[in-house]
Image (cartoon, rainbow, N blue to C red):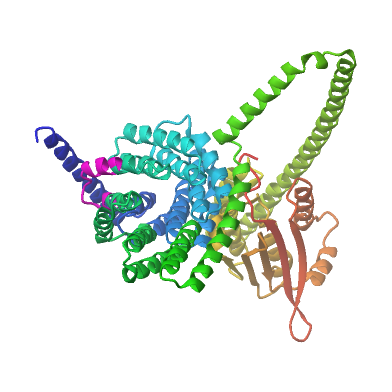
Amino acid sequence: MVFLFPVVLMSQVVEKQKLNILDSLLTIYNVCNDIEKAKASYQLSLHYKDVDMDTSLQYADTAKKLALEYKDYGLYARSLKRLGVIYMYSEDNDLAYNYFNRATRIANDEKDYFLIADIQSDLGLFYQRKSEYKESLNNLMEAYYFFKNEKSSVEKHKSLNRLGILYAKLNQKERSVDVFSEALDVAIDLGEKDREITSYINLAVIQTQIENFENAIVLYKKILEKNPENNLTYQNQKRTCYNNLAFNYYKIKEYDSSLVYAKKSLAIKPDKLFDSRVGQTYRTLGNVYLEKGDYKKAEPYLYKALSIAKKYEIKTAIIDVYKDLCRYHKQIENYKEALSYYEKFTSMESNLLNENFSEQISQIESSKVIEQKDVAYASLSKEKADDKKEFESNIERIIWVVSIFLVAITGIIILYVYRNRVYIAEKQRQISTMKLFALRSQMNPHFIFNTINGVQNSILKSDKFYAYNHLSKFSQSIRLILDNSNHSFIRLQNELDLIKVYVDLEKIRFRDKLDFVIKVDSYIEEQNPYIPAMILQPIIENSIIHGISNKPDGGLVSLEIIPFKNNLKIIIEDDGIGRREAQKIKMSKPKGFLGITSINTKQRIEILEKSGYKEAKYYFEDLYDENRQVKGTRSILILPLKNTYDKGN
């Protein structure tokens, strides 16, 4: 008791600290109305992950929306990842993958490599739950090598546990034990009791898989002696221990002990995140009663286990229950059903073995593959030693020398051609980029010149209010232009901010005879992708100057942005005089007059296509009413919905 008292006291202190943190987070969430609320909401989602999935989902969704609103893209990416995890455990695979994919894209954009590795760890678990082991291994190995040299963290512990479980499923037990031991060291270093218990459970599972059932039982009982606290995380771990003890006792034919622990496991109500594991307990009970000859009790438990395995699409569990049902029907002499289940499990098992065979070949970082390479090299060395005299013959020496010479010459030629092509391609890209900068730089003076004209008109008309308002908006637009001047590509929202200020300037100029509407699809708004800087403003300016300004009563310009085949589709419409009439007016202008907006935009799109922006398109459509009278113009711009370009470009 003298030893246990400090442990209990420390546990109480930790729980009190957790409650204090929760109170602080709730206070921030309820009081603040800024980015701090978004951060608190994200932390609250993590707090409720093992307590209440629905509440965790609500806080994660709130964090996502607020992070986007306040343009904290790092927090936005983490919130998307959190939603992916929640939907993964809710068995909504399509939605989970969508959130993981979006989180990865934003994390790449923000160069948050730690978060990228953590998302890869989650994707590893995502594919593992679907029995897609090749994809699981690829993602988990990427995460493993990133975290390998990182200090201990919760993310590192999760990644190691998931990789260890995958190795166990691929029958690489020794490698699995190594990885679980690494995870245990991380858990101890973190000082987190629940993670330490998880690592011990995983090590005990390996003992079961290598059929050291007595050793596994000893480990599980030692875990239970730690007396896990009465919260949901520890209750889930306790239930896992009971469930696995039931299975291990069943394997050593101590059926009464197996029944005791199976019923203890079922007595603990599972959380939604773990209810798929109840199927394991039902299967153990079914098998125990089958061995005891109590077929009436065995049957319902086995069918319950099958129902849960099918619900969560756990292929290995379905195969195991099919085998049990085959044995059950054989024992009750229902041979037709026994044959049916035999055919089912052999068919599934064959497919799974074929999958696993091809997947195991792909494990380039597995220790078994490395060992096989070492054996191959050792074997080759032995062959060389045995055949040394033959290799040293004059004829073969000549062949080796000539072969090496030819390979070297070929390699040099290939390297030269490759480097020359890369050099030419890079030079072409640089030329295109320089042209793009030159065209973009034309837009800023053109935009500024038009705005100054508007201010001059207000001053000449002695309208001080309009002149002051014009100058105020003008200074705001200059600041936005300067903010974006160092980047070829900017966030869509930044371009929209500039457009709003520009349209306000034109509204002042045209004395409120101009109406303007923006509609942005919610998915695009969340993505907030990069687009070429100053690409939309010239098109809107063209609609206003050539379409609306020549219309006595003014008119409406609308901007709509929607997704279209993995691209952005940007539609700009005006109800102006139409392109034909605008061209007539343009031709009547003095010869010194030059409109550059449309030409400039087309040239920029052409250069963007050459620079890698392959899907970019820009074209016009004339709008007609039912009497075939011109009622305006529609400009359509297609841009790839990808963060293809780095912010620094």
Number of labels in the image equals: 0
In the displayed structure, would residue 213 be above or below residue 321?
Answer: above
Q: Is any part of residue 376 visible from this angle?
A: yes
Image location (x, y in percent) of residue 458: 61, 59
**Position of the N terminus by quadrant:** top left
**Magenta residues, start to end:** 218-237
Viewer-proximal residue among 560 and 360: 360
Q: Is any part of residue 195 visible from this angle?
A: no
Viewer-proximal residue among 32 and 324: 324
Image location (x, y in percent) of residue 68: 47, 54
In the displayed structure, would residue 396 be above or below residue 8?
Answer: above
Residue 260: image quadrant is: bottom left
Farthest-out residue, left? 2
- Magenta stretch secondary structure, dominant: helix
Q: Is residue 519 left or right of residue 81?
A: right
Image location (x, y in percent) of residue 641: 64, 56
Image location (x, y in percent) of residue 537: 66, 56
Q: Is residue 223 magenta?
A: yes
